[in-house]
Image (cartoon, grey):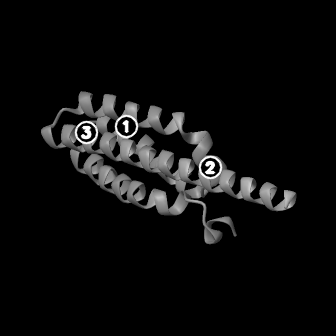
Amino acid sequence: MKSFLVALVISVVIVSGSLMYTNHLDGVARELAEQNGKITEFVAAGDFAGALDAAKGFEDCLNKNKVLLAATGNHEELLKIELACAELKEYAAAENAADAASKCASLDVMIQHMPSNYKIKVENIL
């Protein structure tokens, strides 16, 4: 009976931790998507200074959550997002609207797929 209770407690802790992680990951993806939407709006309006500031905010948000994402996710996907962000910042600094908008669209796709790529699943572990 004692071992059953220990197993039950461990199971509850694992499920609770997984739910908390999933909720946090969804929040991170939502926050990054909002940041990327702001960048897209700035680029469309031709406000490259605003786009550059928003891109730095995007990068800060990504760096703030990098440890969690790196610990559980695909490092190549995280690197692709970081590279796209770096390119976006340079396009915004050079006031290149077409390339900046293209990078925003690429980031949008990567961010949309982030929750499915980072959630704890058997295929993501193997």
Q: Nearer the viewer, mark 3 or mark 1?
A: 3
Helix, strand or loop status at disc 1: helix
Let me know if residue 93 appears in the view.
no
Q: Position of residue 22 (x, y in %)?
A: 52, 53
Q: Could one spot residue 7 in this view of the protein? A: yes
In the foreground, 5 or 34: 5
- Dot 3 falls on a residue whose secondary structure is helix
Q: Residues within 10 Å of mark 1 (few under 14, many from 20)?
A: many
The reply to whether discs 1 and 2 touch (Cβ–Cβ < 8 Å) is: no
Query: Where 117 falls versus 32 (above or below)?
Result: below
- Tell me the amino acid under the disc marked 1: Lys
Please tell me in which quadrant of the rendered image residue 124 appears: bottom right
Quarter holding residue 110? bottom left
Q: Which residue is mark 1?
A: 89
The answer to which of marks 1 and 2 sits earlier in the sequence is 2
- The relative height of residue 5 versus residue 92 in the rendered view (above or below) is below
Separation of residues labelled 3 and 1 (CA atoms): 13 Å
The reply to whether dot 3 and dot 2 touch (C-beta < 8 Å) is no
What is the x, y in percent for residue 17?
A: 62, 49
Q: Could you say where residue 54 lies in the image, as x and y percent from the top left? A: 32, 32
State the residue lying farthest toward the left: 45
Disc on res. 38: 3
Given this view, does label 1 or label 2 mark the residue nearer the observer? 2
Depicted 21 relative to depicted 64: above or below: below
What residue does disc 2 label?
17
